[in-house]
Image (cartoon, rainbow, N blue to C red):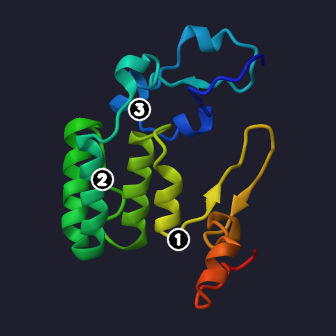
Amino acid sequence: VGTYHQNWMRRSFWQTFPSTDIRKTAWYPDNAAVNALMDDPKPIDVRKYVTPSRDVVLFRKTEAKFIQFEALYHTNPSAAATELFNWVKTYRDTGYVLPATSGQALLDEILRQKGFEFFLEGHRFTDLKRNHKPVDKTGQNSNTFVAAADYYKFIWPIPISEMQTNPNVVQNPGY
């Protein structure tokens, strides 16, 4: 209801955070101002990017940790599982239980934790694309859009001038 609010998240996403996860109350509060809105379901207020002079983050240590977790997943999954578990348990959720220690489920958990950590920071699309995962843009008001990982609009078309300059370059599928 009313104007656009860029710093809100869907309640259904917020509810996927474990109750013991510090991010659930510290960064993403369920506060009185939001609860007073006529929206149904109520959104969650995201306390990121509220002070432009201090909230512009180019790269942070946590991002380096998640790059490490994902790289370890591809080279040493058991080390990735251990590192992820220790980091989340120490810094974000004292009640954390790692749901998987190997395979696709471990990668999914790494990406899920990264999604919690970097909400509204612009990482999700490239993470999904890099890992050949579909993008689910299902909205609260029954607006549904799920795009397969190979959806052609996820890759930019190659400019005609480039194809004319180099005959070895062919247009990306779908364009």
Location of residue 139 in the rendering, given as x and y in whole percent from the top left corner: 73, 42
| Between discs 1 and 3, the one toward the N terminus | 3
Location of residue 33 in the rendering, given as x and y in whole percent from the top left corner: 59, 9
Location of residue 32 in the rendering, given as x and y in whole percent from the top left corner: 57, 8
- Residue at (24%, 63%) from the top-left corner? 80
Q: Nearer the viewer, mark 1 or mark 3?
A: 1
Which residue has dot 2 on it? 66
Quarter holding the N terminus? top right
- Residue at (62%, 67%) from the top-left corner? 155
- Residue at (39%, 65%) from the top-left corner? 107
What is the spatial separation of the Cα atoms under label 1 and label 3, in whole angstroms? 30 Å
Location of residue 120 in the rendering, given as x and y in whole percent from the top left corner: 50, 37
- The residue tagged with tag 3: helix, strand or loop? loop
What is the spatial separation of the Cα atoms under label 2 and label 1, in whole angstroms? 18 Å
Type of amino acid under label 2 = Phe
Tell me: 136 left or right of 76.
Answer: right
- The residue tagged with tag 1: helix, strand or loop? loop
Tell me: 78 left or right of 145.
Answer: left
Which residue is nearer to you in this view: 55 or 108? 55
Labelled disc at residue 11: none
Which residue has dot 1 on it? 132
Which residue has dot 3 on it? 19
Which residue is nearer to you in this view: 70 or 16? 70
Q: Residues within 10 Å of mark 3 (few under 14, many from 20)?
A: few
